[in-house]
Image (tube, rainbow, N blue to C red):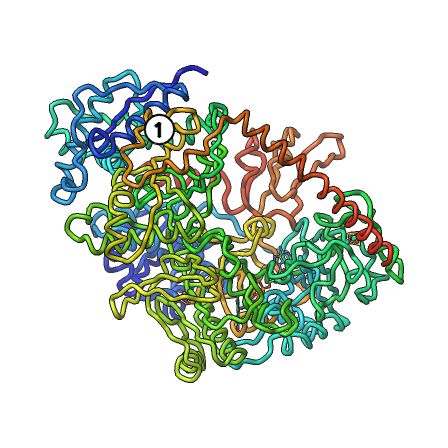
Amino acid sequence: MRVGVFICHCGNNIAGTVDVARVAAEMRKLPGVVYATNYMYTCSEPGQEEIKQAIRKEGLDRIVVAACSPRMHENTFRKTIEKAGLNRYFLEMANIREHISWIGEDKELNTNKAIEAVKMAVAKVMNNKPLYSSSFKVNKRVLVIGGGVAGMQAALDCADGGLDVVLVEKSPSIGGMMSRLDKTFPTIDCSICILGPKMVDVVQHEKIKLYAYSEIDEIKGYVGNYQIKIRKKATYVDWSKCTGCGACMEKCPTRNAYDHFNFGVATTRAINIPFPQAIPKKAKIDPEFCRQFTKGKCGVCAKICPTGAINYEMKDEIVAEDVGAIIVATGYGLFDLDKFPEYGAGRYPDVITGIQYERILNASGPTSGHILRPSDQTEPKTVVFVSCAGSRDKSLGVPYCSNFCCMYIAKQAILTKDHIPDSQSYVFYMDIRSNGKGYDEFTRRAQEEYGAKYIRGRVAKIYPKGKKMVVRGADTLLGTQVEVEADLVVLATAVISAPGAAGMAEKLHISYDTFGFYVESHPKLRPVETNTSGVYLAGACQGPKDIPASVGQGSAAASKVLSLFSKDMLESDPAIAQVNINACVGCLKCVKTCPFQAIKEEVLRNGRKVAKVIETVCAGCGVCTSTCPCGAIQLQHFTDNQLLAEVNAICQS
Amino acid sequence: MAEKEYAYYSGCSLEGTAKEYDTSLRLVMKTLGVKLAEIPDWSCCGSTPAHTVDHVFAAALAARNLAIIEKMNTHTVTVPCPSCLTVLKKAHIGMTTDESFKNEVNALLDEPYEGKVTAKSSLQVIYEDIGLEAIADRVTHALPDLKVVAYYGCILNRPPDIAQFDDPENPVAMDKVISALGIEVLDYAFKTECCGAAFGVPKRAMVNELTHKILSMAIDVGANCIAVACPLCQQNLDLRQEQVNQTMGSSFNIPVLYFTQIMGLAYGYSPDDLEMDKLVVGADHLIRSRIPVEEYRKMKEAEAAAAKKPAKAKEMKEEPKETAKAEEN
Ligand SMILES: Cc1cc2nc3c(=O)[nH]c(=O)nc-3n(C[C@H](O)[C@H](O)[C@H](O)COP(=O)(O)OP(=O)(O)OC[C@H]3O[C@@H](n4cnc5c(N)ncnc54)[C@H](O)[C@@H]3O)c2cc1C
Ligand code: SF4
Ligand code: SF4
């Protein structure tokens, strides 16, 4: 066996705190190591060339690269040695950057630690076996979860690219938050006018299969071959018969149902179509309010429906879909007023959230686009906006900026002036974050052309005084306390992750941060990929972002799927579990522990029971290997022998 | 109910300007079956002056008392004055989370404090440990004329990390305790607004202004009585009311009672027992309507019976209308 060791400087990243030359010199002393050197940037083109040359000149058959994390460059170096004729699994990496040079400052200690780490890698590589991947067929259908603007864009781009798309939306209509907005910054174009046609395109596209009012129940499988179970929630209305005429909604005697679409600004009927442009435009019963469910009698809608679509006995239905890739576009949620006791915690009807104000501004909203304040339906003349309500506030668990509220506050201030010319808006702000194209000009316009008064300071308290709401805050530029008597107060409440985001991440086996936002594979270089291959992100589920950014990500995710599907076959990872049937006693403990259900029972010709790994399902997690009492099940590339060789390497010195 | 026992740290104010708080609290606790154990040789907590000068010294003044309590039967102390409470809790939290601070403080003390005492405001003990049900059970008298707002002041619930009780922005404990007595409590936006505290001496004009706000908001929401749990708040709102009237041109005449005095009234104690004569703005006109609950219940029943007949007729008229409408559809 002829091992070659390459120690990388990574500029000063490693060489700054590790004596790389000494590490190389130590390695030369090890039995089996015939070549060891250190190099400035091993991952660079000449760096890789040097590895190839050494393989040829020195006749190397095993390679160790001591550099950064294998997450970064393992694939790079595997390809390098493959080009030089070695099996790609004859490479080992020792992570001497993230694990050593970046975290310790003592060069002597770091160097000693690096020597041990590289020794381990040498011991491991000498025990490595050649492994070969097999290829499997890709199911070229894609699942898009979430029908907001990001999910719709992804679905349309995939479908236009010729893929079959399954779009699953939790609420009764697609459109997401954007379908609730009035106008959009920075162009003040009508939100539904630009979104509506897209929604129609989605439902009319022959390649898109839409499941509205549905949720993901189960996800099984792996990139290229996922099996999805979708729960179609009971609407109590047969959508194949419902024509969306709205007769039921008109006659339903229950008028106090919570209106999810309008965020409670108004109430709706127990049977309702969420908004006029809803896609699909179908009715649904809310059993929490429907008299047929709460009191056991009513049945008015069943009598009135001209097509007999009402069915109070309807149950949830589970349907199965097979796909090869998944785009997650589940969007975001918003803080509720109850998070703000100092602003009344929802006790004051004239203190509302930004999204509620969008509904009040909206021509198809509950006030038909007339700005009327909730308490007495009068036109407010003084409107106060409070930015960062909950955002950038560690004590509320939201240390981050919600990204788009500065912009929509400016938009709403402009629209307020448009609707009520003799009105005055005040904006309490921490700082104005408007760094997109044309954005700063927009917030300036709100101040200079529309006369919104911006007060730099936070609001301490809001309290009622007669018919007014008094907003008390600091003006930190003047260094005084200010009180504004307002008719209406709008809070730009913090953007949080979508309800149920964490549970969805667990179903998908993708990571999420402490706030429930999904984590991309690399914050700069892989912004729409996740660490689970075949699962991609789009829109605000990854972090607060506005419409342009969400749409951009939707298209980006679609292009990733299209390039993944440009091949007919994908290569499998051979680093999976394998059963030695001679050692297996058939206890089948592994079957129970495998989190991916990748192990099944097999009966041999002689009647003996043994475990068998389903290659395509095994994710290579290795849980089974520590369960097996006889060491019969081994994870390839991480066998007991290979790991023990590493342990021996550091214990012997 | 087994008798609960607490060490009782009354603090200096309750021996002087807030004597009636002490008296009424003791009576109420007796009624609720709570034993208050005297703390032998207790001393001043240090109050505001100490911690503005030296944190270690301030903590030592407080910890001296905590060390004494630690040797008593009970390790839970109840403190009526929010200012004393904050000082005691701050010393305790500082000494139990920072070993070196604890050593510094203990170096000043004859007996070291080991950190075993839990301090709770008297309101917290009544609200959490005794509970609304037990509070309601002891009521003997109704006070139908009372319309109360509960005023908590700045520090009873703040800072939240120290107070560890109720909501720092919209506290509800006192509201709920008084409601449990069957007394009307009104929502009040200035529950935690500052009254000016000790600035009554150096900056009288400012305190008048702040106090004026608190009083006028109470009047605006329709209250005729303010309930408090702090000697200094009581003093600013009650004693200075006339001053406020003179400087701000108002004509307030709203009694400011300790919540324990209100409890005492509902438990049948006489105004003399509760030392109501110590109030500057008298509350006699509110107490006059006090009536035993049994009588009050009968009175209400009679009223309800009288009101029922026309109400029923009205209902009858409305009912068919609704069904007719539904059928029409
Ligand atoms: C008050 C306000 C005003 C705004 N104004 C503007 C503006 O003027 N201009 C602008 O650019 N941006 C604006 N925005 C931001 C804009 O709303 C977002 O950028 C945009 O909605 C993000 O789109 P999305 O598709 O990522 O998420 P969403 O719009 O949240 O859509 C996500 C969709 O996924 C669905 N979903 C969630 N969970 C699941 C699940 N588990 N299974 C299936 N489906 C699920 C949801 O029901 C929803 O339909 C504003 C936001 C607010 C709050
Ligand atoms: S059964 Fe009655 S209450 Fe329920 S949705 Fe139909 S009409 Fe409305
Ligand atoms: S966008 Fe503006 S208002 Fe929103 S959290 Fe960031 S700074 Fe605050």
**Closer to the camera in the image, A229 or B135:** B135
Left or right: A197 with respect to A47?
right
On the image, the x and y values in percent for residue A412 come to 50, 73
Task: Mark 1 and ligand 3: say if the CB distance to the nearest ligand atom is below 8 Å.
Answer: no
On the image, the x and y values in percent for residue B11 come to 22, 30
**Closer to the camera in the image, A142 or A66:** A142
On the image, the x and y values in percent for residue A491 come to 46, 62
**Closer to the camera in the image, A218 or B192:** B192
Left or right: A220 with respect to B184?
right
Q: Within 10 angstroms of label 1, few (less than 14), some, or many (20 or more) residues?
A: some
Residue A590: image quadrant is top right
Vertical arrangement, residue A494 with respect to residue A409, above or below: above
Q: Quadrant of the C terminus of chain B?
A: bottom right
Q: Residue at x 29, y 45 (%)?
A: B237
Q: Which three-letter amino acid code belongs to the residue tagged 1?
A: Pro
On the image, the x and y values in percent for residue A340 come to 44, 53
* Chain bearing mark 1: B
Vertical arrangement, residue B42 with respect to residue A132, above or below: above
Write down the residue under mark 1.
B271
Q: Residue furthest bottom?
A: A449
Residue B249: image quadrant is bottom left
Task: Kindly tell me whether residue A629 is visible in this rendering.
Answer: yes
Q: Residue at x 22, y 52 (%)?
A: A105
Residue A448: image quadrant is bottom left
Q: Residue at x 70, y 66 (%)?
A: A165
Vertical arrangement, residue A561 with respect to residue A322, above or below: below
| Element type at mark 1 | loop
**Closer to the camera in the image, B135 or A393:** B135
